[in-house]
Amino acid sequence: MFLDKTTIAANKTIEISGSKSISNRLFILQKLFGNLRIQNLSNSEDTQLLQKALESDSEIIDVHHAGTAMRFLTSYFAIAEGRTVTLTGSERMKQRPIKFLVDALRTLGAEIQYLENEGFPPLKITGKKLTKSTVSIPANVSSQFITSLMLIGAKLHNGLQIKLQGEVTSRPYLEMTLKILRTLEIPNEWEGDTIKIFAGFDPANLSSAPFVVESDWSSASYFYSVAAISRESLNLRCFKPFSLQGDSVLREIYWECFGVNTISEGAESKISLYPETSFELPKKIKLDLRDAPDIAQTICVTAAALQIPFEICGLSTLKIKETDRLVALQNELFKIGCATEITDAEICSVHFFSPAEPISIKTYNDHRMAMSFAPFSLLKPLTIENPEVVEKSYPDFWKDFSYLTE
Ligand SMILES: O=C(O)C1=C[C@@H](OP(=O)(O)O)[C@@H](O)[C@H](O)C1
Ligand SMILES: C=C(OP(=O)(O)O)C(=O)O
């Protein structure tokens, strides 16, 4: 897709669909416990794939690139007594690890086999009653493994006690799971290194009021980048002042690093992004994003566009996402005039230069590569290769992005 250099019309409003992470948790819980009404669901492909998988009675379930669907369904099918499924995904999904989750489920009594490579999808899962209730799992690879266990915890006879080993990555996603369970009156606690999900939950106690999903903060990041680069104000809906999503840290990051102020207008669930005109850009940006890995690409592109030197750490999980995001970022940032150094968990800018044109950005089957680089077109024309990748989390992205420039 060719994006000509363009300007933004001030004060437009974009309505983003529900959070993919919250929607996917709620779909699993709805299927396990019934009786749950959900509003403002995510329209992402990942959520649709999960919903389809939950409705299917096929023996083969294919979740393509959807990491949360793959991980959450592994535990879901492990307790689906009397059913055997093959759970598979895209070629990339077959390279994304799942061993620690499978080990944990096997400790609890699950029957899961690897059909190709040890430690990776596809999996053959034979649903069983899980008899044990305590398990340990490394917490530094993917929080999705732990959420997956937490979602089935209240279905186990004695509940579930999960001991987290090592450093916890993507912590706010675990807090999100606990808060959602609590909203549904499923008791739980997280003390020290142990998460407990208590048994004895009665689905009849579920409130009849619908669960209204707040909009997706990771998707909002691209518009923070637009505001920071263009210095024009814009509005986003439907966001609440207190979010379940860790990526809402964008409010602080874009204020401190780029001078974009966020004002919540509670009644309409609207937030307004006002870039300060007199904001003095920082000499250097230093951030640890282990709690918010999905906004790393957005922040790197904003900083590169504004030529602010950056040092971003806490990124060890980026190499096992839709692509190796650190390598992809390094390659494509160079095309927009920012040379970087990367390690296993960090990316630092080295110098800025005037990029060679025409610029064509590869997306590596990664929706966030496409969306994070799009705002650079406010400075220079560029082509985004395979723009359809955005479907994974934000199918309306191109429509919303072009609406801003009309
Ligand atoms: O639980 C979730 O909904 C997610 C957790 C994070 O994954 P990791 O825990 O693997 O970092 C995040 O990157 C992903 O987009 C969604
Ligand atoms: C990492 C992501 O998703 P998943 O792990 O669910 O594929 C993402 O949406 O950026």
Image (tube, rainbow, N blue to C red):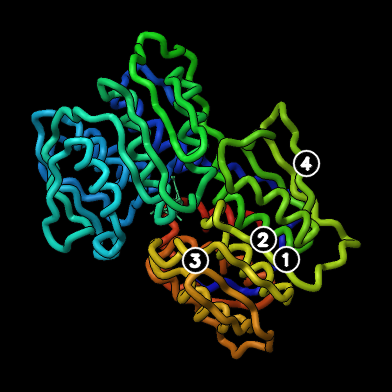
User: Nearest the camera: 47 or 316?
Assistant: 316
The residue type indicated by label 1 comes to: Ile
User: Nearest the camera: 187 or 88?
Assistant: 187
Mark 2, ligand 2, within 8 Å: the answer is no
Compared to residue 190, the image places residue 9 above or below, namely below
Pointer 2 residue? 225
Mark 3, Cα crowd under 10 Å, few <14 / some 14-19 / many 20+, is: many
Q: CA distance from mark 4 to mark 2?
A: 16 Å
The kind of secondary structure element at disc 1 is helix
Is residue 398 in sight in this rendering? yes
- Residue 93 placement: quadrant: bottom left
The residue type indicated by label 4 comes to: Ile
Q: CA distance from mark 3 to mark 2?
A: 13 Å
The kind of secondary structure element at disc 2 is helix
Q: Earlier in the sequence, mark 3 or mark 1?
A: 1
Pointer 3 residue? 370
Q: Earlier in the sequence, mark 4 or mark 2?
A: 2
Q: Earlier in the sequence, mark 3 or mark 2?
A: 2
| Callout 1–callout 2 Cβ contact below 8 Å | yes
The residue type indicated by label 2 comes to: Ser
The x, y position of residue 224, in whole percent, is 67, 55
User: Nearest the camera: 123 or 254?
Assistant: 123
Pointer 4 residue? 263
The x, y position of residue 195, in whole percent, is 43, 34
For residue 229, the mark is 1
